[in-house]
Amino acid sequence: MVMASEDEVSLLVIVVDVNPIWWGQQANREPQFTLSKCLDAVMVMGNSHLVMTRNNKLAIIASHCQESHFLYPFKLWKSGDGHGDDNPSTSGDGKYELLSVANDIMAEEIKILMSRTEVKGNQTDTLLAGSLAKALCYIHRVTKELEAGQEIKSRILVIKAADDCALQYMNFMNVIFAAQKQSILIDACVLDSDSGLLQQACDITGGLYLMIPQKIALAQYLLWVFLPDSDQRSQLVLPPPVHVDYRAACFCHRNLIEIGYVCSVCLSIFCNFSPICTTCETAFKIPLPQMVKAKKKKLKPST
Amino acid sequence: MAALSEEVLLVVKRVRQRKQDGTLYLMAERIAWGPEGKDRFTVSHLYADIRCQKISPDGKAKIQLQLVLHTGESTNFHFSNESTALRDRDAAKDLLQQLLPKFKKRANKELEEKNRMLQEDPVLFQLYKDLVVSQVISAEEFWANRLSLNNVDHSASNNKQEVGISAAFLADIRPQTDGCNGLRYNLTSDIIESIFRTYPAVKQKYAENVPHNLTEKEFWTRFFQSHYFHRDRISTGLQDIFSECAKQDEKGLRSMVVQGVKNPLVDLLSLEDKTLDEGYGSNSMAPSTSSANKTVKENSNSAIIKRFNHHSAMVLAAGAGKKADAPNDQASETSSTDGNSRDSDFFQPPVKKVKIQEAIEYEDLHMENGKKTVALNLKKSDRYSHGPVPLLPQQYTTSQDIINSVNCIQQEIANYKPCLTQVMSSSTASSAIAALSPGGLLMQAGSQQAINQMVPSDVQGELKHLYTAAGELLRHFWSCFPVNTPFLEEKVVKMKSNLERFQMTKLRPFQEKIQRQYLSTNLTGHLEDMFQMAYNKFHAWQTRQMLRKT
């Protein structure tokens, strides 16, 4: 049960947040942990996953503020087509060729991505929802391209740096529910500040959420917590799940409320009672308290 | 013990009970037996207590009557008068048969119902034990809500469906050989009823002949002996009382054939027995239908088939009941009277029309004439697509910051070379591992043991019972509000005292018990809170009542 069978493919998609603005500021805050270090750690994680079993597959997506770009696998590869034209210089240290090729491609692609970054003032948020959607599409495609008799288990690991973007809320939620339907786990490794959206994603899909105290030990955290797949996790002692704040936000102020009023026609949530729902303009009768009647009764005998 | 004013319906002498001679008395409301020579009754049962009576089979030497009570006890009476024993027993049995149904107590049924409910639902039983047996609440209050639910079920089951007739009831009789060249037919009342319902002619004959001319036994013997019952119905003439039945059956069959089938989509005439005969169908000899040419074998075959069809038709007719006949008769009347004058479409028999209608129309394809609905009118639908306001304020970045950051990163990545041998130092790795190990920084929340592992299971079980019982009491209490009637006032006061009593008798001992077991978890805090809320509400209500009165 713990050993994967020959026909089971395990696909890991790593979504790395490479928001240049955040990482640029990070370079000033903490020079010992920069984007390069982070990418190294991601590479170690990817290599480890590929080495676990021959049937494991990997994909890495860089989530930028202008686009989501696949760092691995190389887009122009066709199956069976070797990269024959390239220099056959496998790294001199005798590494498993798949890993060295993968690392080279990743490095190459991130350079290309960063070099074409344009500076735009209104686009400072990481396009995380889009990257997750791309990840889901990739998983879907790989699932369709399986050979007969093969089964696949996929999961997405999100390494998040910058803060949540409130505008991506709906897209995010849609992605989360789609992943849940497809039984795809979403794990989250958060570097800086807690993200409510990712907490929800992990809770709903059954993945792990972790905010790491030491960024420089990122590789260790990744290997310890996120490398085992979901079957193996039940056998290990891992950090316990986080308490998720599922409170709804009222439609009038966007505050999180625990008890509120819900319009029975359009299901919009309000923190205060109002006789007319502002979303669908339905009028509601206000229930009269019973004390009014009692008072009337009292008046009669006295007159 | 015999009340002088009781009306004695039947007295049977020479009845033994437990090997003692005595006399059996059947009164208006009870049955009693007293030994010979004494004028007291040693055995006395009210008819209401008797569940059923049983008699010994006919062939046995001892002629006995047994009474089974509701409680399960049984009393045996042995009729020992040589000459009249059987008659006495049958007389007693018949009288009891008439009297017992009158006294079937309704209340007993309720008791049985309650017992059944308690046995079926262990949670209910536990609740009953906790509340009623320990005198916290009275039995009537306990059953007040529950019985009303079940009465609904009873009324539904009273409208029983009529049991149909098995088509094989005649075959089920299965004669057994008697050993000496005779046959033994076992007739139960079910089979007799089936025969009467299917063949009303036989029922008529039975009514005419029994018990004047023939006994029941003789009637049935003749029935089975007659050729009416057997396969080959060659009419014998003779004194066979069933030859008339045979003729009636023929008439019935013919009228059924004439009536035909009312469904225009069913064409019975297209079903024909066509045998290929000799020559595999190449012989062009048409099958003759005149009865003169038929062989003997064909005749008997057609007779059996005719009887078979008739039997099936009678079984169906008996099962259809009386309601189906009435509209059919009306239908045939309307078709026969005005068939000439009006348009033929108008006056097709309604059954035929319905059948054709069913065949050509599909309900799903009809135009939808659903109820009028009101459309949802959303003025501000974008409200649904926004999430909550982020709790932490967004960091504000100046455009200069942005430019600097981007440049910095671009430079860094342009010179990026993966250096996988120096991703982190061993000290950072070990500190990370320490944080992830049990007891470490990140594992704090998981170190709390689940409560259900720390508390023994019997304590858990007791807690569950306490919750169920307390829930029941609190439900009674809270359902009294708002207090509108004097009945509810009384009830609310009573319930409050019930709650206090429950707290004293059940909750406190439980708390002491768990304290003695050194369990530090607060298991009863929630229960106490619930009780306190109830008391608060009661006090508030009481003060309001007093203010009103003054």
Image (spheres, helix red, strand yellow):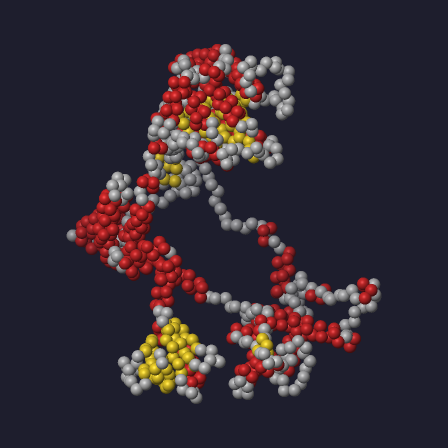
Is residue A2 visible to the viewer in this orientation of the structure?
yes
- Pinpoint residue B97: horizontal percent, then vertical percent: 42, 77
> Which residue is drawn at the image coordinates 63% and 81% (left, top)?
B226
- Pinpoint residue B99: horizontal percent, then vertical percent: 39, 78
Is residue A116 or residue B68 the one in the foreground?
B68
- Pinpoint residue A233: horizontal percent, then vertical percent: 45, 32
**Above/below status of B307 relative to B493:** below
Is residue B325 visible to the viewer in this orientation of the structure?
no
**In the picture, which quadrant includes the N terminus of chain B?**
bottom left
> Which residue is drawn at the image coordinates 35% and 55% (left, top)?
B124
Place residue A270 in its image quadrant: top left
Is residue B161 or residue B1 the one in the foreground?
B1
**Above/below status of B180 relative to A236:** below
Place residue B433 in its image quadrant: top left
Is residue A123 or residue A18 the one in the foreground?
A18
- Pinpoint residue A131: horizontal percent, then vertical percent: 50, 25
Q: Is residue B167 left or right of residue B448?
A: right
Q: Residue lying furthest left in this view?
A: B550
> Which residue is drawn at the image coordinates 35% and 27% (left, top)?
B440
Q: How many numbered marks, from 0 up?
A: 0
**Above/below status of A197 relative to B1:** above
> Which residue is drawn at the image coordinates 50% and 24% (left, top)?
A48
